[in-house]
Amino acid sequence: MQIRGIAIALVLAFSLPIVTDIAVQSQAVANLAFPEGEYFNVQGQPRNWHLTLWQVQGKYYYKNLNLKTGKKVCLVGAIASGTQARPVFTWTNGKYKYRVAWQTVQPDLVRLQVINPSEQMILNELLIRQPGEFEDPNATKC
């Protein structure tokens, strides 16, 4: 009977650090910085995108306007991943993924990636925050 108790204690002792590690990682991801603002193609590049990112009550919003065609995509509810130094936020629209990654040491630059259902990257653009450049009063509305 004592052997069974010892075995259960060992199993619990070894599993506890794993549960703690998962909880710490989840908490760390939940506290990732989010790059709120309006972003455009880097200067010197053709202006194709007007990306607006914002958060309200813990929900992450993504709105991207194609400046050439006028088409707009607005998404809510990103999944946060990455690290404190390089957060990544991913929205899904059908089978497409819209990913924004940035480095907290360069807060005015984001990388916008769009991945199609075949897991191929169909867009990979570096965008820069340009406050005062566009200033759409309805930018943070879908």
Image (tube, rainbow, N blue to C red):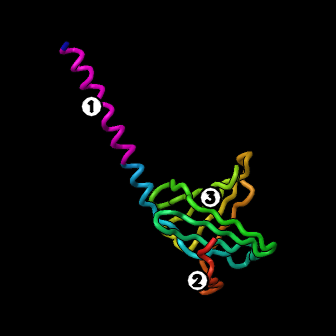
State the residue position of label 2. 131
Q: Nearer the viewer, residue 78 or 16?
A: 78
Query: Which region is colored magenta?
Result: 2-23
Determine which quarter of the picture holds residue 134: bottom right
Q: Nearer the viewer, residue 76 or 106?
A: 76
Q: Earlier in the sequence, mark 2 or mark 3?
A: 3
- What is the three-letter code of the residue carrying label 3? Arg
Q: Nearer the viewer, residue 88 or 141?
A: 141
Residue 13, placed above or below residue 31: above
- What is the three-letter code of the residue carrying label 2? Pro
The CA distance from mark 1 to mark 3 is 39 Å
Q: Is residue 72 left or right of residue 35?
A: right
Q: Earlier in the sequence, mark 1 or mark 2?
A: 1
- What is the three-letter code of the residue carrying label 1? Ala
Query: Mark 1: which secondary structure?
Result: helix
State the residue position of label 1. 13
Is 12 one of the magenta-colored residues? yes
- Residue furthest to the top in view is 1
Q: Main secondary structure of the magenta part?
A: helix
Image disc number at residue 99: 3
Q: Residue at x 54, y 54 (%)?
A: 79
